């Protein structure tokens, strides 16, 4: 049995980031950059006004009120003429600052008198001027390789006129469920059978990361069927199986992983839930054998499959964010393995957390109510109320009043 850290490290050591491809800007939401983005021009492109107002020279507004002739009007989208000494230019937000102007006085601080303007407040140097390159300077690395592209990053790419963006290819992740008792939703639920919830959670988890699920179905608990179904995963970048990886008579994933061209790197991880976990290769495809219990499968996905998929994508953050929160109700455990408790984290002045429900490895309702894993280390037997505990966050943190 190996530690969570070593298990993850071993898996990641076998994962190579996929090559990039050019993707239209309209399609890059949720994708990862495969190259640094270097600004090939400055943003803003030229000095421009942050306000509707009057562009002036400071010497002309030293004595207040100052009455100045308005010698030009500069709408956004136009160009400007140099500002004549002793005059003002009416300027709109986003319009280019005329050469020689040192500040823009906002319209609210002026009084308009036909062809003249009275400046009622002396501006400071550079006031209301947005300078060339103040947002993004020419030649700077504005977005790093491995960045997840969301609305603001896409806005920057648009500002830089990148209509095609280098993104990591989306990995294809095969999902195989196993179990003689497990049936898909269109099959009769005869006595002894259960619906394959893992098929749906795992496919959804894959989708959530921006990878492409390749669902290959449910294998019966026999080697031939498992191998047969795995054959359909030949084009995948990673295979996830669920079930059949424990010590039961019909747990055959390990057998398949150790036969023929396949190879198993490790089996069993010191954690609860999620101890039965195998990692190896189906042919040359990295394969993670997740536990069958629905909550265990999800915990193990978050600990091992998620970082592997994000690593295929070249993401620069691959583990769940971790933070400390104050425990509301105590947690008792054996000093055997680290526990990953499904938890509900609430915000406010002090982050607080508590178990989100019963922790049996088959219980999915507490997973559905959770937004984090409370991680209690191996040796610890009791986490007291009020103690600060580590939480690995995977869902939105709720506001304080929603905690019970
Ligand atoms: P196993 O590791 O195959 O013994 O499975 C452990 C537990 O998880 C058993 O109770 C299974 O019925 C259950 N299980 C396995 N696969 C699935 C699945 N695809 N959906 C829901 N439960 C499952
Ligand atoms: Mg099984």
Image (spheres, rainbow, N blue to C red):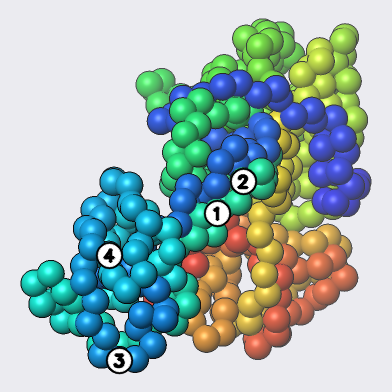
From the image, tell me which residue sits under label 4: 89
Picture coordinates of residue 150 (x, y %)?
A: 48, 45
- The reply to whether the C-beta atoms of the residues labelled 3 and 2 are less than 8 Å apart is no
Q: Tell us which disc is closer to us: 1 or 3.
A: 3
Rendered image: mark on residue 39 = none
Q: Secondary structure at mark 2?
A: loop
Find out whether the residues at labels 2 and 1 contact each other: C-beta distance under 8 Å.
yes
Look at mark 3 in the image and give the residue it sits on: 64
Q: Residue at x 56, y 84 (%)?
A: 350
Among the two numbered marks 4 and 1 on one chain, the one whose residue lies closer to the N terminus:
4
Residue 388 in the image: state x and y as whole percent: 70, 81
Looking at this view, is 221 or 323 the one in front? 323
Is residue 209 something one can see in this rendering?
no
Name the residue carrying label 1: 133
Asked whether 35 or 194 is in front, the reply is 35
Quarter holding the C terminus is bottom left
What's the CA distance linking mark 4 and mark 1?
Answer: 23 Å
Q: Secondary structure at mark 4?
A: strand
Q: Nearer the viewer, mark 2 or mark 4?
A: 4
Where is mark 2, residue-wise? 138
Q: Is residue 400 left or right of residue 325?
A: left
Q: CA distance from mark 2 to mark 1?
A: 7 Å
Label 1 SS: loop
Picture coordinates of residue 320 (x, y %)?
Answer: 66, 54
Q: Give how far apart the Cα atoms at labels 2 and 4 are.
A: 29 Å
Q: Is mark 3 within 8 Å of ligand 1?
A: no
Sequence-wise, the earlier of marks 4 and 3 is: 3
């Amino acid at each position: 049995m190996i530690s969570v850290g070593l298990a993850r490290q071993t898996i990641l050591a076998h994962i190579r980031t996929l090559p990039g491809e050019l993707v239209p800007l309209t399609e890059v939401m949720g994708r990862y950059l495969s190259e640094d983005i270097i600004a090939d021009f400055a943003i803003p492109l030229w000095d421009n006004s942050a306000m509707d107002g009057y562009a002036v020279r400071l010497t002309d507004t030293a004595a207040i009120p100052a009455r100045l002739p308005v010698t030009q009007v500069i709408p956004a989208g136009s160009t400007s003429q140099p500002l004549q000494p002793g005059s003002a230019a009416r300027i709109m937000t986003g319009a280019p600052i005329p050469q020689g102007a040192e500040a823009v006085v906002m319209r609210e601080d002026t009084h308009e008198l036909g062809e003249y303007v009275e400046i009622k407040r002396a501006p400071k140097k550079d006031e209301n001027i947005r300078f060339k390159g103040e947002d993004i300077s020419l030649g700077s690395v504005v977005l790093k390789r491995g960045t997840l592209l969301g609305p603001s990053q896409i806005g920057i790419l648009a500002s830089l006129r990148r209509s095609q963006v280098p993104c990591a290819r989306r990995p294809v992740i095969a999902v195989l469920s196993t179990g003689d008792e497990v049936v898909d939703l269109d099959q009769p639920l005869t006595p002894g059978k259960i619906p394959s919830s893992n098929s749906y959670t795992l496919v959804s988890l894959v989708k959530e990361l921006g990878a492409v699920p390749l669902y290959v179905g449910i294998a019966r608990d026999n080697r031939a069927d498992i191998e047969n179904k795995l054959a359909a995963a030949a084009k995948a970048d990673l295979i996830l199986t669920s079930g059949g990886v424990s010590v039961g008579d019909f747990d055959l994933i390990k057998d398949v992983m150790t036969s023929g061209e396949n190879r198993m790197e490790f089996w069993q991880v010191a954690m609860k839930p999620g101890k039965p976990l195998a990692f190896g290769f189906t042919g040359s495809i990295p394969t993670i054998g997740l536990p069958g219990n629905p909550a265990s499968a999800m915990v193990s996905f978050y600990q091992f499959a998620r970082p592997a998929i994000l690593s295929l994508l070249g993401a620069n953050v691959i583990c769940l964010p971790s933070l400390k929160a104050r425990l509301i109700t105590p947690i008792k455990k054996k000093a055997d393995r680290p526990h990953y408790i499904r938890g509900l984290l609430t915000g406010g002045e002090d982050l607080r957390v508590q178990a989100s429900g019963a922790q049996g490895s088959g219980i999915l309702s507490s997973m559905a109510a959770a937004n984090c894993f409370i991680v209690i280390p191996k040796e610890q037997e009791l986490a007291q109320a009020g103690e600060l505990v580590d939480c690995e966050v995977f869902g939105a943190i709720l506001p304080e009043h929603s905690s019970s």
